[in-house]
Image (cartoon, helix red, strand yellow):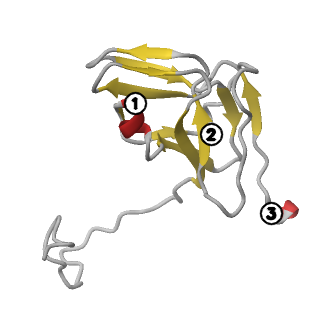
């Protein structure tokens, strides 16, 4: 990525016990986030896993936080809101990012474990809804119709 096209993100770490965030150019558009403390969960329990960072996102951007592909397999955790959205106003000195999870089994997330990932996306543009009686396009077969044999 060219230096002049990079966005600047100010980041505050709440601990020096987790690895610093890194963008792996060409490998992924997602950046891993780590647990900033050890968290023990019992099956059926909800907790917020602290991620040890607060960020000031560029103007006009939001962050999308989702589990890593191995999070359920390794920990039995489900992110309870499916996708976490962190808007640009969540940037205060105490606005630590957290991952809300539900445990399907007893598990332990250790300090510095890679537990979720994020990417930043531009905010949705301002839109106006125009009501019509018909859209005039071909139907695809209804909700859930793709992939049927």
Q: Nearer the viewer, mark 3 or mark 1?
A: 1
How far apart are the alpha carbons under marks 2 and 1?
30 Å
Q: Residue at 14% across / 73% down in the picture? A: 148
**Which residue corresponds to mark 1?**
75
Q: How far apart are marks 3 and 1 (CA)?
A: 37 Å
**Mark 2 or mark 1, which has the lower sequence index?**
1
Q: Name the residue under label 2.
A: 88
Q: In which quarter of the image is the C terminus?
A: bottom left
State if disc 1 and disc 2 touch (CB < 8 Å). no
Residue 63 in view: no
Residue 72 percent coordinates (x, y): 37, 37
Specify the label residue 127 is tagged with.
none
Q: Foreground residue, 62 or 47?
A: 47
Which residue ends up furthest to the front in the rendered image? 74
Depth check: 95 or 27 in front? Answer: 27
**Is label 2 in a helix, a strand or a loop?**
loop
Quadrant housing residue 44: top left
37 sits to left or right of 127 = right
Q: Residue 5 carries which label?
A: 3
């Amino acid at each position: 990525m060219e230096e002049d096209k990079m966005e600047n993100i100010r980041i505050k770490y709440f601990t020096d016990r987790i690895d610093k965030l890194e963008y792996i150019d060409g490998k992924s558009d997602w950046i891993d986030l780590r647990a900033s403390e050890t968290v023990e969960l019992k099956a059926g329990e909800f907790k917020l896993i602290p991620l040890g960072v607060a960020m000031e996102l560029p103007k006009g951007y939001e962050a999308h936080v989702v589990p890593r592909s191995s999070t359920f397999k390794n920990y039995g955790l489900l992110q309870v809101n499916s996708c976490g959205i962190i808007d640009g106003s969540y940037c205060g000195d105490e606005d630590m990012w957290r991952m809300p999870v539900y445990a399907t089994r007893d598990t332990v997330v250790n300090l510095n474990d890679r537990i979720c990932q994020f990417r930043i996306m531009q905010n949705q543009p301002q839109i106006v809804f125009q009501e019509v009686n018909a859209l005039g396009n071909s139907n695809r077969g209804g909700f859930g119709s793709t992939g049927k044999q």
